[in-house]
């Protein structure tokens, strides 16, 4: 079975739980190289999304992703709100009005999400942002989809690569976002947005099993 609207909604509820569990960790990471609100921002956004899904789950995966996008854009704020919002919006557009998503659709949605983040934030790999987690995730997802993997396999590969990509931000000097104001002092810290991206993908992978 492919990934239905209900399953996408269930996965996003799981993301909301994980973001809540990791709220303080994300706040602490953002306190080290930013303004300390990343966990708070995301928790507010995903809590609002769960409330919206409690009211009504839209009929297609794309419509669920679009609903997530508009909620995150209006509720999260900061740098991450528009970036995650754009990611979900591009993912929604990429899957169109399909009733179920297969592995190729999921990999394509992740690629569209990355393209949206890059179009909006202009960060490249190595700038110490969520792009450092999402870029290797997309490459891994595409290669698993291209070699006949299923949705769970695509997301597991994406999560693994995102976790490594997030870790790779530790030694980097930030060149985008608030952390860039610290210059060299941003080195030696994990980027909060890269961490949240890895958490999100790990949770989606868990939901798809
Ligand atoms: P703010 O910095 O406005 O307080 P958040 O704390 O919610 O916003 O999010 C910070 C995260 O956003 C960073 O850790 C980084 O991963 C991500 N980020 C910031 N600027 C950019 C950008 N231009 N492109 C991609 N990601 C970015
Ligand atoms: Mg912040
Ligand atoms: Mg802020």
Image (spheres, rainbow, N blue to C red):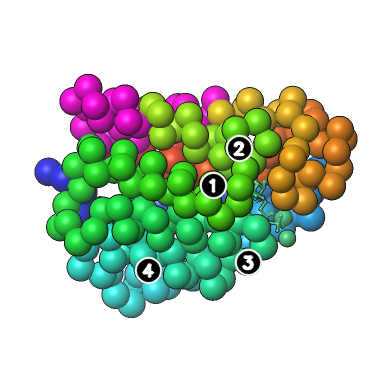
- The answer to the question of whether label 4 and label 3 lie on touching residues, with beta carbons closer than 8 A, is no
Whether residue 82 appears in magenta in the rendering, the answer is no
Q: Which mark is residue 149?
A: none
Mark 3 CB lies closer than 8 A to ligand 3: yes
Tell whether 90 sits left or right of 200. left
Residue 174 pos. (x, y %): 75, 38
Q: CA distance from mark 2 to mark 3?
A: 22 Å
Give the mark nearer the N terminus: 1 vs 4. 4
Q: Residue at x 74, y 25 (%)?
A: 171
Give the labeled residue for mark 3.
Answer: 77
Q: Residue 41 appears in which quarter of the rendering?
A: bottom right
Question: From where the camera sits, is residue 192 visible?
Answer: yes
Question: From where the camera sits, is residue 198 visible?
Answer: no
Mark 1 secondary-structure assignment: helix
* Quadrant location of the C terminus in the rendered image: top left
Q: Residue at x 25, y 30 (%)?
A: 145
Whether residue 152 appears in magenta in the rendering, the answer is yes
- Which dot, 1 or 4, sits closer to the camera? 1
- The answer to the question of whether label 1 and label 2 lie on touching residues, with beta carbons closer than 8 A, is yes
Tell me where the magenta segment starts and ends, as one range. Answer: 141-164
Q: How would you rate the neighbour count of disc 3 (Cα within 10 Å): few for under 14, some for 14-19, many for 20 or more? A: some
Give the labeled residue for mark 1.
Answer: 118
Give the labeled residue for mark 2.
Answer: 124
- Quick one: 106 or 205, which is closer to the camera? 106
């Amino acid at each position: 079975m492919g990934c239905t609207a209900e399953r996408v909604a269930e996965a996003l509820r799981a993301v909301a739980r994980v973001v809540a569990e990791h709220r303080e960790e994300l706040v602490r990471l953002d306190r080290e190289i930013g303004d300390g609100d990343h966990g708070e921002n995301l928790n507010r956004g995903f809590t609002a999304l769960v409330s919206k899904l409690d009211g009504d789950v839209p009929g297609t995966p794309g419509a669920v992703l679009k609903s997530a996008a508009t909620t995150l854009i209006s509720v999260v704020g900061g740098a991450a709100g528009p970036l995650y919002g754009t990611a979900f919006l591009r993912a929604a557009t990429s899957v169109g009005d399909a009733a179920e998503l297969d592995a190729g659709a999921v990999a394509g949605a992740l690629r569209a999400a990355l393209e949206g983040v890059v179009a909006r934030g202009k960060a490249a790999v190595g700038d110490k942002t969520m792009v450092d987690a999402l870029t290797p995730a997309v490459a891994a997802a595409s290669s698993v989809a291209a070699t006949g993997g299923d949705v769970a396999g695509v997301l597991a590969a994406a999560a693994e690569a995102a976790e490594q990509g997030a870790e790779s931000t530790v030694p980097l000097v930030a060149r985008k976002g608030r952390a860039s104001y610290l210059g060299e002092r941003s080195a030696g810290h994990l980027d909060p947005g890269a961490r949240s991206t890895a958490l999100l993908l790990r949770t989606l992978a868990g939901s798809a099993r």
